[in-house]
Amino acid sequence: MPFLTTHDGLTLAYERSGTGTPVLFAHANGFCKELWRPIERLLDHVDAVALDQRGHGSSQVGPPPFDWWDLGRDVLCAVDTLALGAPRVGVGHSSGGAALAMSEILRPGTWARLVLIEPIIYPGPYGRGEDHPLVLGALRRREALATREDTRAWFAGRGPFARWTAEALDLYVEHGFRDGADGARHLACAPQTEAEFYRTATTHRAWDRLGEVVCPVAVVVGADSTTHPAEFARFLTGRFPRGGLVSVVGGTHFVPMERPEAVAEAIRDAAGVG
């Protein structure tokens, strides 16, 4: 598995496949790069790069507190290290969507187009969310399960995973966990790491700078999303000078893992690739 080194010395894992227009994929908090594979497979003539965010998958995690702007810097590091040529397209889900928007703010002109799927970018008030339900939920998460079969059975049809495709769930079970010395399967993104990213999700203030993102931006949301309901999705899209909104029927916040064909179609329509 290839790795790259960040500005602060962490090693991040990535995978790369195909040829054509460079497209960088950034996943959501708690997940892993392999979850993009079903969507990548549906896109033709694409040089697809999927990155494990710091603290996720096979990447290293730095010390807390976490700065979400480092996620944007990591994206820029991938662009530079892998010499991704222009015009480039960025596709990000949840925290990955925020990372891509922040990378464009940090270095305007990096992206020809952005596809931001349920990006975690909200208006103030700003501050650490110590008691946010997502923080508390992450801290309660089971860190280990006995086998792959037990892991799949635990998540199948459960909560946020209820609408996932079988392939997406299999990829998460295989790559979102690691074999431990005890023989059990352990979360690759530790509950404490996931929780800390949630705590700092409301501190980065990228909302106040979205007007600086002047490339075309497609904001993709699930029609049944509770994190990006219709009114807020329109409000968020309007913050971008060249924003457009795409709502995917049958999708929730986890729409890439639920409706890969629809998300691939949105990427093709918005970014002109594949």
Image (tube, grey):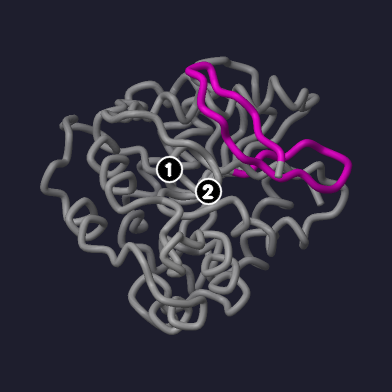
In the rendered structure, does residue 19 fall within the stretch colored magenta? yes
Query: In the rendered image, which quarter contains the N terminus?
Result: top right
- Label for residue 30? none
Q: Crowdedness of circle 2 by 10 Å Cα count: few (<14), some, many (20+)? A: many
Task: Name the spot of residue 53 as percent of width and height, x first.
Answer: 51, 40
x 69%, y 59%: residue: 37
Q: Is 195 situated left or right of 223 in this image?
A: left
Q: Distance between the residues labelled 1 and 2?
A: 7 Å
Q: Which of the 4 quarters of the picture holds residue 209? A: top left
Q: Label 1: state its secondary structure.
A: helix
Callouts 1 and 2 close, C-beta under 8 Å:
yes
- Label for residue 95? 1
Q: Is 180 situated left or right of 87 in this image?
A: left
Q: Is 46 situated left or right of 163 in this image?
A: right
- The segment highlighted magenta reads 2-25
Q: Which of the 4 quarters of the picture holds residue 169? A: bottom right
Q: Residue furthest front?
A: 181
- Label for residue 27? 2
Inspect the image, locate mark 2, and give the three-letter code of the amino acid beneath it.
His
Q: Which residue lies furthest to the left in this view?
A: 131
Task: Name the spot of residue 266 as percent of width and height, x first.
Answer: 65, 55
x 61%, y 41%: residue: 51
